[in-house]
Amino acid sequence: MTHHVTVMSRETCHSCHVAEAEIERICGEVGATWSVEDVDADPELRAEYGDRVPVFLVDGVEHGYWKVEEDRLRAALA
């Protein structure tokens, strides 16, 4: 099964851009797919995630936020 990571992000968030680069690298190494959702593009997402971005979802389930925990993410994608 191929896992998918979604990064809940916003354009003006430096931490989000750092996390996206880490997610891209890790997903590339383990063969998972990934995408970015801009929370500011959807009022419901903005209301749900607010200033808590970046938030990481694995297969649609919240996995973590703010910083990528690489070992934990790799385990979830194994």
Image (spheres, rainbow, N blue to C red):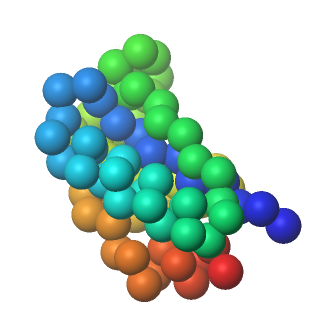
- Residue 1 sits above or below residue 41 on the image: below
Is residue 16 toward the left or the right of residue 42 in the image?
left
Is residue 24 toward the left or the right of residue 18 in the image?
right
- Is residue 60 among the parts visible in the rendering? yes
- Residue 43 sits above or below residue 7 on the image: above
Residue 46 rendering spot, x and y as whole percentages: 35, 26
Q: Quadrant of the N terminus?
A: bottom right
Identify which residue is drawn at 49% across, 74% down.
Answer: 73
- Residue 6 sits above or below residue 31 on the image: above
Identify which residue is drawn at 41% across, 15% down.
Answer: 41
Identify which residue is drawn at 56% across, 69% down.
Answer: 29
The foreground one among 28 and 46 is: 28
Residue 30 rendering spot, x and y as whole percentages: 61, 71
Residue 28 rendering spot, x and y as whole percentages: 56, 60
Is residue 1 toward the left or the right of residue 39 in the image?
right
The foreground one among 38 and 46 is: 38
